[in-house]
Amino acid sequence: MWESLILGVRYHLLLLIISIILIIITPSIAMAYQIPSDRDVEWLAYNIYHEARGEPLSGKIMVAVITINRVEDKIRFPNTIHDVVTQPSQFSWYWDGKSDQPKDPKAYKECLAVSRLVYDIWKDGSLHKIIGQLDLDSVKWYHNEEVLPRWAHYYQFVTKIGKHLIYKDT
C-alpha cells in the first residue's frame, strides 16, 4: 500500500516538475523558432478591428495581409505583428490616446476569427501562394478614402476595398 502511495506521489511530482519546465522554456522555444502565439493573433485581431471593423470581409482580410506583409519586410518594418502594429506613426488607432479595448464584442469576435484564419494560412505557407497569384504579396499600404496622406503618391495604387485604397511598392 505504501509503495503505491509513494509511487503516486513521485508520479505527480514528476508531472509537476515537467509542467514547470515546460512553462519556463516554452516562451524561449517560441521566440527561437517563431512558433505562433495567441499574442500574435490577438494583435492582428486588434489591428483588423480598429482599422476595418465596418469593412466587408475582404477589407478585414486585406488589413491582415498588409500587416503580415510588413512583418515579412525585414528592412523597413519590425519582425513581429505586435511591433508592426505598435510602430510609431503607422496605425493611428494605437497612437490616438484613446482606449484600444474593443467596444463591440460581436465585431471583435469576427475580427479575431479572420485573424486566426489568415494567421494560420500564413504560418502553413499557403498565404503567399494565394496572394502572390493575385499580385498582392507586396501590398503594404492603405488609407481611408476620405484622406490623402502625403505618402500615397510614392506608391502604386492597386485597388479599393470598402473605404480603403490599397497600395504596393513601385
Image (cartoon, rainbow, N blue to C red):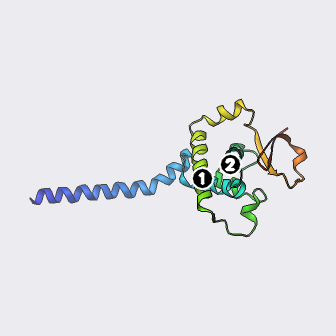
Residue beneath the point at 71% across and 62% down: 94
Residue 27 badge:
none
Query: Counting residues from the N terminus, which is met first, the one under dot 2 or under dot 1?
Result: 2
The quadrant where residue 65 appears: top right
Image coordinates of residue 166 in percent, x first then y, are 80, 44
Give the residue drawn at x 23%, y 57%: 10
Identify residue type, mark 1. Glu
The CA distance from mark 2 to mark 1 is: 9 Å
Q: Position of residue 62 (x, y in %)?
A: 71, 44
Expressed as whole percent of the image width and height from the top left, the position of residue 20 reads 38, 58
Whether residue 17 sits left or right of residue 75 in the image: it is: left
In front here: 88 or 45?
Answer: 45
Q: Residues within 10 Å of mark 2 (few under 14, many from 20)?
A: many
Nearer to the camera, 21 or 53: 53
Q: Which residue is mark 2?
A: 60
Q: Are marks 2 and 1 in contact (CB under 8 Å)?
A: yes
Up the image or down, 47 lies above or below 129; here it is below
| Element assignment for label 1 | helix
- Residue corresponding to mark 1: 110
Viewed as shown, does residue 4 lie left or right of 117?
left
Q: Is residue 122 left or right of residue 138?
A: left
* Helix, strand or loop for disc 2: helix
